[in-house]
Image (cartoon, helix red, strand yellow):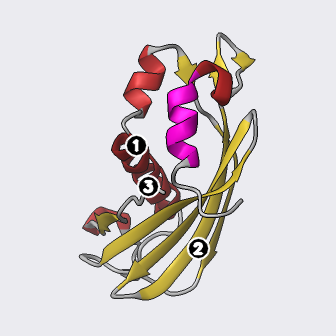
Amino acid sequence: MTKVEPYKHEVKYYECDGMGVTHHSNYIRFMEEARIYWMDVLGYGYERMEAEGIVSPVVAVSCNYKHTTTFKDIIEIEVKVAEMSALKLGFSYTMRVGGKVVCTASSTHCFIENGRPVALSERFPQLYEAIKSTVELL
């Protein structure tokens, strides 16, 4: 099983609202940063997929906010595969500051080439196997 270390994001001043708390909308961006990092670590980043004609839109997203974060907090984001099928890939995210869970989230993605869904296992078997190598139990 391949282990990918958590992605780290330092909260920027502009990501906070008037109360000094990280604005809730930024967590979706943090998920994207962590997911791109995760794919890069696997050796098959978004740049490579897009250069080969594949895009991976988000089809669903969910966030559960547990505790606030503020300017300069370092959020560690653990990314795991939550579901995997021929046409969709679901991720779960656990975000922590100092070991304390601040947000749990999920996102679901599909893969499209020339406007049509593609099966990742057929179009990118190496990426499919790399992703499978990170999965504990589905």
Q: Is residue 19 above or below residue 48?
A: below
The residue mark sitting in front, 1 or 2, is 1
Residue 56 inside the magenta-drawn segment: no
The residue mark sitting in front, 3 or 1, is 3
Identified at 40% across, 34% down, the residue is 45
Mark 3–mark 1 contact, CB under 8 Å? yes
Between 56 and 24, the residue placed more toward the observer is 56
What's drawn in magenta, residue-wise?
A: 124-132
Q: CA distance from mark 1 to mark 2?
A: 22 Å
Q: Is residue 50 above or below residue 20?
A: above
Describe residue 111's horizontal placement relative to residue 53 as left or right.
right
Q: Secondary structure at mark 3?
A: loop
Q: CA distance from mark 3 to mark 2?
A: 22 Å
Q: Give the residue at mark 1.
A: 42
Between 29 and 51, the residue placed more toward the observer is 51
The residue mark sitting in front, 3 or 2, is 3
Q: Amino acid at mark 1?
A: Leu
Residue 131 inside the magenta-drawn segment: yes
Callout 3: few (<14), some (14-19), or many (20+) C-alpha neighbours within 10 Å? few
Q: Give the residue at mark 2.
A: 104
Q: Residue furthest front?
A: 1
Q: Give the residue at mark 3.
A: 2
